[in-house]
C-alpha cells in the first residue's frame, strides 16, 4: 500500500494489544495504540486516523462511550468493535452508537485486516450520495443531520449516528419509497438478515421521536422498504 492506513486501536489487555499492534505494523499499517477510552479520545483528536478499532470492555471509559464521542466529532470514520460479548443486545448497542462492524474475540489478525480493508473500500460504510442537504423541515420538526439533532418547538432530541443517517435518507426521498436494501448497504454496508432486523429497530425509534407531530408517518411498504410522509 502506498499510503499507510492509520488505525486507532484501543484495547486494555496489554498483551493482546501489543500483539495486534505489531502484527498490523508488520503488514504495513500505522497503529496508534491506547489502553483505555480516555487516552483513546485524546489520540483520536490528535492523530486523525483512517479507522478506529475499539475494545468494548475497558476501564476509565468503555468502547461504546468512546465511539459516541468519536461520532460527535466525525460522523463518517469507520468504527470496528472488538468484544467477547455476542448477545444481540450488545451488538445492537454497538450499532446504535455508530459502530460499523463487530468482531468477536478471539479473532485472527487476517480477519481483522479483511474487516479493516472492507470498511475502507466499501462505499456503504458512510453516506455517499449526490444530495448534500443536511438540514430539513419535517412537519413541525427541524432536523440537522450533521449535528444529529431533531428539534420540536424548542425541545431537542439527540439522535444516534445511524438514526440520523436513516432519517436523512428518508428526508431526501420524502414521499417516495426508500428501498430497504439501499439503506442497509449505505448505512450498514451489508443487507443481510441481521442488519435488516437491526434497521427495523431503528425505524421504530425514529417513529417514536417523530410522534409529537401526527401528520408525520414512516410507512412500511411491505417487501420493498419505507416511505416518509409529512
Image (tube, rainbow, N blue to C red):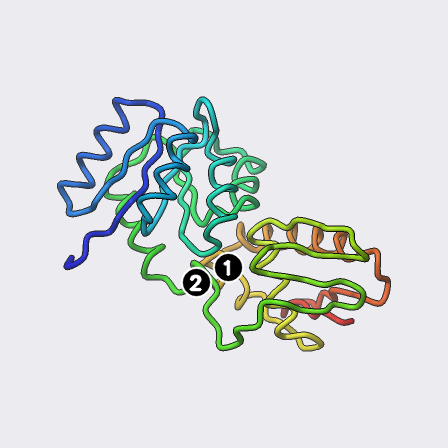
Q: Which dot marks residue 124?
A: 2
**Residue linked to disc 1:** 187
Q: Residue at x 39, y 65 (%)?
A: 123
Sequence-first tag of 2 and 1: 2
* Dot 1 alpha-carbon crowd within 10 angstroms: few under 14, some 14 to 19, many 20 or more: many
On the picture, is 203 further left or further right than 12?
A: right
Q: Is residue 128 above or below residue 23?
A: below
Give residue 228's quadrant in the image.
bottom right
Residue 17 lies, in percent from the top left, at 27, 29
Q: Quadrant of the N terminus?
A: bottom left
Most foreground residue, 115 or 163: 163
**Which of the numbered marks, if any, corresponds to residue 209?**
none
**Residue 222 in the image: x percent, y percent?**
69, 67
Query: Would residue 19 be found to the left or right of residue 188 on screen?
Result: left
Front-most of 127 and 40?
Answer: 40
Give the crowd class for mark 2: few <14, some 14-19, many >=20 residues within 10 Å.
Answer: many
Dividing the picture into quadrants, the one containing residue 164 is bottom right
| Badge 2 vs badge 1, beta-carbon distance below 8 Å | yes
At 48% from the left edge and 73% from the top edge, which residue is drawn?
129
What residue is drawn where x is 81% and y is 57%? Answer: 153
Amino acid at each position: 500500500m502506498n499510503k499507510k492506513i492509520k488505525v486507532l486501536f484501543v484495547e486494555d489487555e496489554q498483551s493482546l494489544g501489543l500483539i495486534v499492534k505489531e502484527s498490523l505494523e508488520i503488514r504495513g499499517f500505522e497503529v496508534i495504540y491506547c489502553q483505555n477510552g480516555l487516552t483513546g479520545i485524546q489520540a483520536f483528536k490528535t492523530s486523525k486516523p483512517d479507522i478506529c478499532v475499539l475494545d468494548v470492555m475497558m476501564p476509565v471509559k468503555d468502547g461504546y462511550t468512546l465511539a459516541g464521542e468519536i461520532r460527535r466529532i466525525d460522523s463518517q470514520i469507520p468504527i470496528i468493535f472488538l468484544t467477547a460479548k455476542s448477545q444481540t443486545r450488545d451488538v445492537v448497542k454497538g450499532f446504535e452508537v455508530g459502530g460499523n462492524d463487530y468482531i468477536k474475540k478471539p479473532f485472527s489478525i487476517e480477519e481483522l485486516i479483511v474487516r479493516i480493508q472492507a470498511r475502507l473500500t466499501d462505499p456503504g460504510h458512510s453516506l455517499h450520495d449526490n444530495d448534500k442537504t443536511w438540514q430539513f423541515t419535517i412537519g413541525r420538526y427541524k432536523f440537522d443531520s450533521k449535528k444529529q439533532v431533531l428539534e420540536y418547538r424548542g425541545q431537542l432530541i439527540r439522535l444516534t449516528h445511524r438514526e440520523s443517517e436513516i432519517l436523512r435518507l428518508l428526508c431526501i426521498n420524502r414521499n417516495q419509497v426508500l428501498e430497504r436494501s439501499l439503506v442497509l448497504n449505505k448505512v450498514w454496508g451489508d443487507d443481510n438478515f441481521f442488519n435488516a432486523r437491526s434497521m427495523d429497530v431503528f425505524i421504530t425509534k425514529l417513529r417514536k421521536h417523530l410522534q409529537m407531530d401526527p401528520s408525520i408517518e414512516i410507512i412500511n411498504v411491505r417487501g420493498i422498504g419505507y416511505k416518509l410522509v409529512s
